[in-house]
Image (cartoon, grey):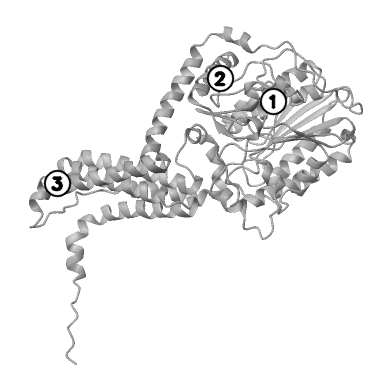
Amino acid sequence: MFGKRKRKIDYSSFYAKYKDYQFTVLKYLFSIIISFLTLKTTGNLLYVIIPLLELIIIFLVSNFIIKKNQIIGCFINNLFILFYNVEILVLFFGNSFVTLIMLNNLSSWEALKGRIFIFGLGIVLLLTFSFLPTKYVETQNKITYYLYKYNVVSLFLLSAALTLNLSLGGFFGFKYSPGKSVYDLAVAEYDYIQLIQKAERESTEKKKLFYKEEVGDFIKKPKNIPEKPNVILIFTEGMSQHIIDDERNITPNIKELQSKSLNFSNYYNHTFATYRGIIGQLYSGYQLDNSDQNHLISLQSILKKEGYHTSFINTEAHNEEFTSYLNHLGFDSVLDAQPSKGEDSTFDKDAYKELNKLMSNQPDGQPFFISMYTFGTHIGMNSFDKKYSDGNDRLLNRFYDLDIQFGKFIEKFNNSKYSENTILVFTTDHATYVDDEYRKSFPNQSRGMGNLDKVPFFIYYKGVDPQILDVQGQNSVNLTPTILDYLDISRENYFLGNSLFANKEYRTVFSSLFVSELTYASTSDAVVRYLSKHEEEKMETYIVDYYSSARW
């Protein structure tokens, strides 16, 4: 009857007291929220706990500096928060912190226009909240005045956060630390620059280390294949073999043709990403920098000497960097494909139309070599034409659409005169990139290395008996010598790889060596492992020697 009177909260007084801290609260609240969001991507609470500990450290350190000097403290706070937020957002979208390969392939991010809204929104929020003004957070009261005056409590909290952070890092590994990631990235970038500079200083005399008088002859060309058959080589953007093998039958046409072909199983990509993947396969070597040229001997240069007319279909004609890259590969002609309606790039439907058109316009009496890179399955893209099932899965959409367009091409190809004198080689530039869409589409797929995986490589000729050749972890650096061996073509070269038809004793260390920036791994015997420090140093010497030879 006579209940206690409820105390009325004076919100205006509360707001007046703390309004100076509103931007500071919003700034840290944003970082906290996106940190918890990474659970959706990683499923690992350590990716939340350890970053939040580092966020506390950022707050305590910058708050102390802000008290002494507002300008310097805010600058340091903004910088650290920016680094933190970038790492966390990349973790959310890509399942890893920022890597060197991401930085070196920023030009490829233009392809993410298919998700321009979500990525654009992320960038806007990132910059907005990272640069919100920060005030010194007053923590004094009558009891703790002297403790806070001399920063005893702050130092205690800082020490506790640092100790806990280092303890968790030491026990579980520092891979969960955005701060350690930033440090490692800075060190890697410095080492990478040093590596490039070292290669630039090396003498061209190193070239003789890689010289070979001939391409190894380990298999005879099937008798029903003409003496100089036409060759079509298709590099599909970012395709792992498991996509073809998937029980949902995402790519039935590719799967069917693979079963009718000479198929190389347990075959891996030798590098990442597109620029290095294509040039590395055509020249059977490695590339340290996207923009650098390779002046050694390539598949197209050897076929040109054999009387072939060589062409490359450019499906990214609007991309000046990529176009320049293709123009320096030594093909007789680079055809700029017409972009798909309303798009900058040529999607797979129109790319295969361009291939049909170019094939039919080849001069009579001269064999041709046509290579093409299809763009439609690039990260961030959606299907231009056909959708998989209900169309809600963007990644499955783009591979399903690729398969439809490839199937239409194969149908026309097999009904044309070219099927009698043309071999078709199907492969990829690199493995499928692991991002949030990939994990959603393939939740049961896991890799020890996100950029390394089994990839398709098969050779089709109508009438040749199908065969599966287990290459036991050899990789795409072996593509060119394998094709030449299959065609019974042998010339001098500087190939690091060898024919996949060769016996095991003919394999080199490069036959199963994955190199991407400063990452070195082996896929020998179809087992992925990082190289030891000693092995890395040895391989780096070889790669630098090759690079310095190739670029001159």
Residue 370, above or below 491:
below
User: Mark 1–mark 3 contact, CB under 8 Å?
Assistant: no
Q: Is residue 58 visible?
A: no
Q: Is residue 478 left or right of residue 286?
A: right
User: Quick one: label 1, few (<14), some, or many (20+) residues within 10 Å?
Assistant: many
For this orientation, the residue located farthest to the top is: 205
Distance from Cα at disc 3 to Cα at disc 2 = 53 Å
The kind of residue tagged 2 is Ile
Please, what secondary structure does the residue beneath circle 3 have? helix
Quarter location, residue 297: top right
Quarter placement of the N terminus: bottom left
* Residue in the picture at 48% in, 53% down: 43
Give the label on residue 152, or none: 3
Q: Is residue 112 left or right of residue 135?
A: right
Which residue in the structure is indicated by mark 2?
543
Q: Is residue 112 left or right of residue 391?
A: left
Which residue in the structure is indicated by mark 1?
478
The kind of residue tagged 1 is Asn
